[in-house]
């Protein structure tokens, strides 16, 4: 038997043994061919003993290990860190309700294209009426809230939360002032003359 016949029989036996053992015969055959192209098979093909065939099989296993290692993507492991440090509270404080109410009223006044003087009149008016307290209640008259609406439930059409929401009270108060006096300075002028608006 010549060396080529011996090589063919060895490869066929090796493929059959791999397929029977549950491995991938195609991968072994491909590796054998690749080894043959690089010239490494010539060494294995010239040896006809069984021990040489086993050594060739070991070379094939090494080739598969290298091929598998190259095709596997690297895995990134993320560490999880824990700490006993407590979260720090924010360093800024929320502005008082009075300041927030004035800022909101100022935005609404400027949206109506009223001047800064109009806001000063509004500030003077509502400072005298309620000191910008959205829970202010006049026991004598029953007036309620920042604009001192009389009765207080009139502010309900601006929002159902009129009892505790200063923004709802401010919206209602500005509508009332615009409808009855035209501007905050008009309302402030009436208040100074009659002590009410």
Image (cartoon, rainbow, N blue to C red):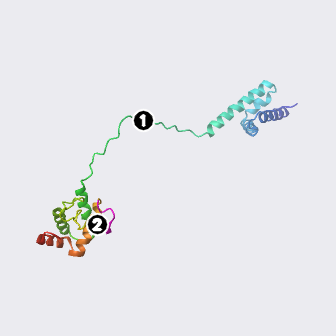
Numbered range of the magenta stretch? 154-163
Q: Residue 149, position in %: x, y? A: 23, 67
CA–CA distance in space, label 1 to label 2: 54 Å
Q: Residue 141, position in %: x, y? A: 19, 65
Classify 175 as above or below 25: below
Question: As rendered, which of 16 and 5 lies closer to the eye?
Answer: 16
> CB atoms at circles 1 and 2 under 8 Å apart?
no
User: What residue is pinned by disc 1?
Assistant: 82
Helix, strand or loop at mark 1: loop
User: What residue is pinned by disc 2?
Assistant: 153
Q: Residue at x 19, y 69 (%)?
A: 118
Specify few, some or many for label 2: CA neighbours under 10 Å numbering under 14, 14-19, or 20 or more. Answer: few
Q: Residue 4, position in %: x, y? A: 83, 34
On screen, residue 193 versus residue 1, left or right, reads: left
Does residue 113 appear anywhere in the picture? no
Q: Residue at x 72, y 35 (%)?
A: 35
The picture quadrant where one finds residue 17 is top right
Q: Residue 111, position in %: x, y? A: 28, 69
On screen, residue 127 versus residue 167, left or right, reads: left
Classify 14 as above or below 148: above
Query: Of callouts 1 and 2, which one flags the residue occurring earlier in the amino acid sequence?
Result: 1
The picture quadrant where one finds residue 5 is top right
């Amino acid at each position: 038997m010549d060396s080529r016949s011996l090589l063919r029989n060895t490869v066929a036996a090796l493929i059959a043994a791999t397929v029977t053992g549950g491995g991938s015969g195609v991968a072994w055959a491909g590796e054998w061919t690749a080894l043959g192209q690089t010239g490494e098979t010539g060494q294995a093909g010239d040896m006809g003993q069984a021990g040489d065939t086993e050594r060739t099989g070991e070379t094939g296993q090494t080739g598969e290990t290298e091929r598998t290692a190259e095709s596997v993507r690297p895995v990134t492991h993320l560490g999880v860190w824990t700490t006993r440090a407590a979260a720090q509270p924010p360093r800024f404080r929320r502005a008082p309700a009075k300041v927030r109410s004035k800022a909101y009223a100022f935005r609404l006044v400027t949206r109506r294209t009223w001047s800064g003087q109009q806001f000063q009149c509004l500030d003077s008016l509502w400072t005298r009426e309620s000191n910008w307290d959205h829970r202010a209640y006049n026991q004598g008259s029953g007036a309620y809230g920042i604009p001192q609406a009389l009765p207080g439930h009139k502010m309900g059409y601006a929002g159902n939360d009129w009892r505790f929401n200063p923004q709802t009270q401010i919206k209602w108060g500005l509508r009332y002032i615009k409808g009855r006096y035209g501007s905050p300075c008009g309302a402030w002028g009436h208040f100074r003359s009659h002590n009410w608006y």
